[in-house]
Image (spheres, coloured by chain):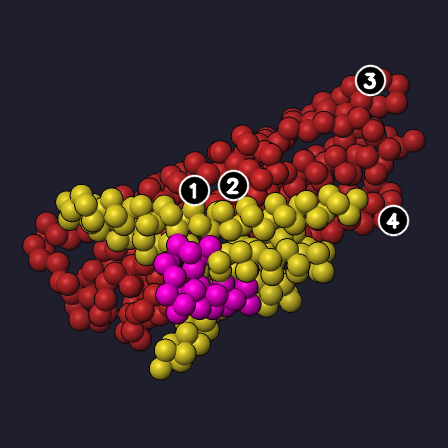
Chain colours: A yellow, B red
Amino acid sequence: MLTQQIFFNTFYALIGSLGFSIIFNIRGKHLIFASLGGGISWFCYEIGLALEQSSVVSMFMATCMVTVYSEILARRMKIPATIVIISSVIPLVPGGGMYYTMLESVNGNEVGFLKKLTITLFEAGAIAIGIVLVSSFARILKMQKR
Amino acid sequence: MMDTHETMHLAAEAGKIILENGGETYRVEETITHICQCYGIEEVDSFVTPTGIMMSVTDTEGNSFSLVKRVTKRVVNLEKVRLVNDISRRVQHEKPPVRSVREELKHIKTIGSYSHLTTVAISSTAAGFFCLLYGGSFRDFCVAFFIGCLLNLLTWISDKLQLIGFLTNLTGGAVATFTALFMTHMGIGVNEDKITIGAIMLLVPGLAITNAIRDTIAGDLVSGLSRGLEAFFVAVAISVGAGFAYEFWYVIIGTVQN
């Protein structure tokens, strides 16, 4: 049952990323790579949660994985890595956290608001650190090659 | 020896296309430097921010020329970024004549985006699937799909009226939340929170965040900061809009269904 849910969610994330790739005007075969990235990122996130990690840690791991995927692809296909990273990371962006933070604030629940806000900021931070870590490493490798 | 002026304008043009279509700032600087150096201009410096390009070159006789390009309208068209990136790579290996590269850039500029109908259909689908992803049911999917249509229409109208981004996102957050609450109240949707989250995913500043991070890594602190701030303000605008709609609903109906 659980595995089925992961499978379905990965598929949903894939379609969502595909939609975003089209909104960002990516064309041709790059669409496939970008949407696959969305599926990969969500799958890794779900695996992280299944291993009883917090959402922040899971997001960090997922972002790392998908950035590695994007950088490798960028070197292979000779395309800017951004194209793949942006569409792949979209499903992880804490839109939910943003909404629930707003909800707590409107309902005047300060403690809940702060809790949700902290988690949302941490999740956004985890995504950022994940990209920073892998992309910096990729840059170093690129410098070494020259 | 190539004409310095021509090369400088070519490099600036290539940079401008990348910057206007959602490329990172450091990529613009690298492209400008790269193109100039491939055509034999050794001394070239550029300073690029998300809203403009400043560059200066010095030719072999020691004359300096400078150029400022202001970027006002920014859209997202990653295909153009990729094509200019390709040209930049080709210039290094093949050294095509400046004139032909200029023609290619002209051609890239004319590349359109996907048709409006496609974009509407795709935005709606994306909103619907994100709603499913965050745990919505099939009925929620339908409502999110509808809100996706609305949001796309809203973006289109605000483009026509040339409204500022803050206002667009504020209205977007409000429309998404209000519609979700209304539809749930009418018994069409089930979880108004899942619907809203799915729909506002269309507005979240994914590109701004990613580019802010990548610019910061590359040492482009000014751009990193400004893009980061942009992303933050977009998030705040969406939240404020959503909060406003929620309050509004609360006052009118008096009961929010949980």
Q: Comparing marks 1 and 4, which lies closer to the viewer?
A: 1
Give the residue number, with chain letter if any, for mark 4.
B94
Q: Position of residue B115 (x, y in %)?
A: 53, 61
Give the residue number, with chain letter if any, for mark 3.
B63
Residue drawn at (43%, 46%), measured in percent from left and top? A125
Query: Which amino acid is tagged 2?
Result: Ala
Is label 4 in a helix, a strand or a loop? helix
A41 is within the stretch colored magenta: yes
Q: Quadrant of the C terminus of chain B?
A: bottom left
Instruction: Estimate how packed mark 1 is, as few (under 14), some (14 to 19) or many (20 or more) residues with alpha carbons within 10 Å.
Output: many
Give the residue number, with chain letter if any, for mark 2.
B212
Q: Is residue B42 left or right of residue B255?
A: right
Name the residue nearer the viewer: A145 or B67: A145
Pointer 4 and pointer 3 on the same chain:
yes
Magenta residues? A36-60
Specify the label residue B231 is tagged with: 1
Residue drawn at (87%, 44%), measured in percent from left and top? B95
Comes first in the chain, label 3 or label 2? 3
Instruction: Estimate how packed mark 2 is, as few (under 14), some (14 to 19) or many (20 or more) residues with alpha carbons within 10 Å.
Output: many
Q: Position of residue A13 (x, y in %)?
A: 45, 67
Q: CA distance from mark 1 to mark 2?
A: 8 Å
